Every structure is written in C-alpha cells, then in structure tokens.
Amino acid sequence: MDKHTSLGGLRLGHKFLILSLIAVILASIPTWLYMREAGKSLDAYLDERTGVPAVLDGLRVVQLTQQHRGLSALVLGGVAAAEEKRAAKQKEADSAYATTDALVKSLHDTTLDAAWSQARGDWETLRSQVSNKSISVTQSYAAHTALVPKLLKVNDLIGDFYGLSLDPDRDTYQLIQAMFYQLPYLAEELGKTRARGAGLLAKKEASPTDRLQLSSIVARVTDRLDQTLTAFYKATRYNGDFETTLAPAMRDADQAARQIIDLANREIVQPEALTYSAENYVALSTKAIDLQFALNAAASKQLDTILADKIGAFYVTRWTMLGAMLGLLALAGYVALLISRSVTRPLNNAIAVAQSVARGNLVNDFDVGAPNEVGQMLRALRDMNDSLRGIVGEVRGSIDHISAATRDIASGNADVSARLESQASNLEETASSMEELTSTVRQNADNARQANQLVISAAGVATHGGEVVSQVVQTMGEINESSHKIVDIISVIDGIAFQTNILALNAAVEAARAGEQGRGFAVVASEVRNLAQRSAAAAKEIKELIGRSVEKVEIGNRLADQAGEAMGEIVSSVQRITIIMSDIATASAEQGTGIEQVNEAVTQMDDMTQQNAALVEQTAAASASLEEQTQQLVGAMSRFVLGTEERGGAPAPRPAARPVAKQQRLAIRHA
C-alpha cells in the first residue's frame, strides 16, 4: 500500500484526530440509542398524560348514559316529575357525546371509529325512543344496559390508543387498572342496580324473577367492588402516597357502594311490598355512583401529577445526560489535545535536534521532559549528541596529531633526500678519483723499470694515494652512518604508520557505535587506515632496501680499509724501493686489482644511493598523500560544531619539524 494513502503517512496530530472522531462516534452511538429509547419512554408518558382527559371524557359519557338510564326508568315507570331532570340529563349527555365524537375523529383509528359509530348510533336511537316514550321500562333498561358496554369498549380503545393499558411502572399500572378498567364496570353494575331498582320501585311491585335478577346484579356489584379494591390496594403497596391522597375517597366510594347493596337487598329484593320511594332510591344510587366517578377523577388528577413528574424527570435526565455526554466529549477532546501536544511537541523537538545534528551542529541543549517513552527517546538523543560530540572532539585531536606527524615525516624525507643527493655527488667524485688512481697504478707498473728515476715521484704519488684512500675510508664511514640514520627514520615512519592504523581502527569502531550518524566518518577512517597500511608497507620495503644498502656499504668499508692497508704497503714499498725493487711489479698488480674492486664497490654504492633516493621520493609522495587525506578529514570534521571553538578556539596545530642541515659534499682532489 502506498505510504501516502495509509495511516503510516499521516501526521500524529491527524492520527489523534481520527482516534478522537472514533471515540466520539463510539460515544455517540450508545448516547443516541439511549436518547431514542428515552424519547420513546417520554413519548409514552406524554401520550398517557394526553390520554387521561380523553378517558375521563369517555367515562363522562358512560356516567351520563347511566344516569339517563335511571331517570328514563322513572319517567317510563310513571314518575312524571322526573321528566325535566331526564331531559336535562339527555342534553348534557348529547354534549358529552359530541366531545367524544370530535376526539375519536381526531385519532383516525379504524377500530375505534367503528366501535364509536355503533355506540353513537345506538344512543341516537335510544334517546329518541325515550323522548317519544315509545319504549317500555324494560326495553329502555335493556337498551341502556346494552349501550354502556359498547361505550366502555370505546373507552378501553381510547386508553389503549394512548398506551394507558401498557404503563411500564407498577404503581401507575395498578392505579390505571383500578380506576379506568375496574371502577367503570363497578359503576355500571351500580347503574344497573339503580335503573333496575328504580323501575321496580316505580311500579310498586316485583316478581320473583325481578327480585332474582336484581339480586344477581347486586352480587356482581360486590364482585366488581372487591376487584376494584384489590387493584387499588396493589397500587398503594407500590406507591405509599396513594394511601394519603386517594384512600379516603376510596373508602367513601366503597362505603356508598355497600350502602346501595344493602338498600337494594333490604328495600327491593327481600320485602314483599315495595314501599320505598323510587326517587330517593335513585338519588342515593346516583350519589354512590357519583362517588365512584369522583374517585376516578381524583385518581386521574393524581395520575396526571405522577405523569407530569415523570415527564419532567425524563426531560431533566435526558438533558442532563446529553449535557454530561457533551461535557465528557469536550473533556475528552481537551485531554486528547493535551496528549497530542505532549507527544507531538517533544517529537518536533527531537526532529529539530536530529536535523541540527545532521547539519553538523552538536551544540544542542534541550529539555528531555517527563520520564515517559518520549522523554526516554529525547534523553537517548541527548546522550547520543553528547557522545558524538566527544567522539568528534577526540577525532579532531587525533587528526591534528596525525597532521603534525605527517608534516614531520615529509620534512624528514626532504632532509633524507638532500643528504642522499649529497652522498651521490660524493660517490661520483670518488669514482672519478678511483679511475685516476687506477691509471696511476698502471703507470707505476709500466714504469717499474724506471723506479730509480721516478722513486721520488712514486713516493709522492704513494703518499697522495694514501691520503685519497683515507678520505675514501672516511667517506665510506659517513655513508655507513647515514645508512643507519635512514634505517632509524624508516623505523619512525613505520611506527607512525602503525599508530595511524590504530587511530583509524579506533575511529572506525567509534563510527560503528554512532550508527547511521557516523557512516561518513567510518568511510574517512577506513581511507586513513588504508593509507597507514600503505605507508607501513612502503616503509617496510624501504627498510629492506636500506638494509641491503647498509650491507653493501659495510662491504665497501671493508674494501676501503683494505685499500688503506694496500696504500700503507705502497708507502713502505716506496721507502724500501731501493731494496725490493723487484717486488714493485707484483705489488702494483695487486694494487690494480684492489683498486678495481674498490671502483666496483663505489659504483655499487652509487647505484644503491640512487635507489635509496628514489625510495625516499616515494616515501615523500606517500607522506604528501597522507597529509592531503588528513586535510580532507579535517575539512570533514570541521562541519561539526562542538562549542569549544566559540568559547576558546580550536587547538593550534603542532609546528612542523625543522629540516636537518644538509651535509657538506666531499670533494676528492686529484694530486
């Protein structure tokens, strides 16, 4: 994968930003899920609170229909005085029906619309029949009684539409079940008791069947009352506040319902003659039923308060959660920013230090920060910078010493070269003198017969020859001494090459420890080591050649000694020439042979001296190359800034060795 399109090509700040965005997304998902579920619960509570007044309106329709049933029984039973109350109740019921009709139409629920249309149609037919008195008491009772369950079903559907039947909390669920699903049916059974008993009391008679039917209704009232009380007391067990706010009204409603049960049994079911006032019976029954609905209204008010508190708590919780989440996200963003800065800033410092080191500036003073991973990296970088500064300083010092030693070697080679040139000139003069001496000896041999006449001249020539031989001996001694000095110089060169090789090896080791930063220095150290090895090899070759030259010089020295002895014999012979004239020829022949050997030795010495001069020139060239490489290494090291130059300046280079004075050339004078 292309590094520019992968995470590896991103800056640390961008990576931290991506992590922050991922964290925001991870936190947003559960937050959104919580807010969505909380919104559902909040919407459910809002729907329930909206549905409470709607259910109360539906129960109001049921209550008015029940009251209309009782008044209709009185009117149809012959109590004409109740007609005005019935008509007023009918008008009130019509208004309640209209309110519920508008509510049902606004909900747009098909099942609810169908149930309501049927109940509304039955009511319109029933109210018309009762108004026209075209229906009997029994038929009116049956029609009203059949209508009320339909209205209760409509009310149940309204409660279901608003979610009242599925309340998630135990206390409000039991309260809703008691008030909206049990109490209306209790009120209906009480309404049946009122309507059935009012009709019988209005007729002043009741058959056994009528009494049995009323007794059955009263029994259902008792059952419904017990079920309602059971649900209510479950609610109070889950919420103790209901005991304070609703229990008194519940006890009043319970007491009133039980009074109606006792009244129906005592005045209608049990007596043979029905003498109790129908209007009083209706009034007491209506009061008991109204207490049931009053309890329902109080419970509805309490339920509305509870739902309002829950809705408010949900709003507070939701906004608190959202605010806390936003606060945590802001805090997380701030912490992420601090973490990003705590990582990127030290890394930027490290990059700046590395770039400064790459430019050769080793004067870097920076804070390593906290002892964490980044701090450890900065501390290691500072240690590396300090170590590299020390290494470069040591290498600079070593290079200065190498440079000074190289200059000393070059100066010494120049001195050696000058001395070798002087020796070569002396050897040329010596060779010329030896040729003249050979010619003279030959003349002595040729003129042996004229020894008497030339004895004085021969004595002078012999004396002069002795002096020349002494000079030759002296010259050969000086050559031998110079050869030993050359050997000592070559030993110095060999030692310097060995030291240079050791220093280059140490520099290579330190460069290897520096890693990538010391790679260039390692190359330079390797070149210096190669030059040192070449110098050592050249010095070794020179030493071997000089050794051979020394051997030849020693041979020449011995020959010169022999020549001195021969010249002594010549002098003795000249002194004894008068006595041993016969031996002159033999002595002259021996002298000629010795002089020829000396001439050959001098020639060989001349050749060796020339070879030594060539080797010295090669050594000088190698020293010059070594000095040039040293200057290049000095230039490479000068890129590094150690801080010592600014404070006190670089150490001064060692002065070059003073050249050795040239030896005076030996001149051989011919006699």
Image: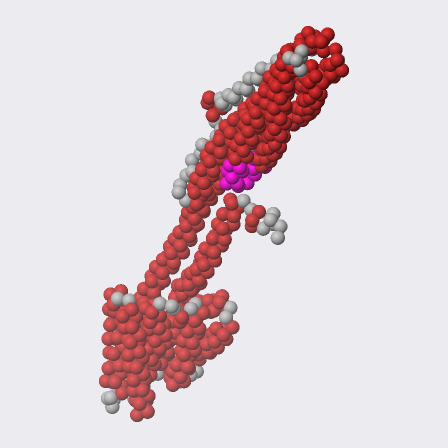
Position of 118 relative to 171 (above/below): below
Name the quadrant containing residue 477: top right
Count of numbered badges drawn on the protein: 0
Q: Residue visible at 46% across and 78% down?
A: 122
Q: Observer-nearest residue: 149 or 471?
A: 471
Q: Position of residue 106 (x, y in %)?
A: 49, 66
Position of 386 relative to 57 (above/below): above
Q: Position of residue 331 (x, y in %)?
A: 41, 47
Name the quadrant containing residue 403: top right
In the picture, measured across the screen, residue 283 lies left or right of residue 585, that is left
Q: Residue furthest bottom?
A: 208
Q: Which contiguous range is marked in magenta?
A: 505-525
Q: Position of residue 35 (x, y in %)?
A: 44, 58
In the picture, measured across the screen, residue 626 lies left or right of residue 584, that is left
User: Main structural element of the magenta stretch: helix, strand or loop?
Assistant: helix
Q: Residue visible at 40% across and 51% down?
A: 324
Q: Observer-nearest residue: 590 or 322?
A: 590
Q: Observer-nearest residue: 324 or 189?
A: 324
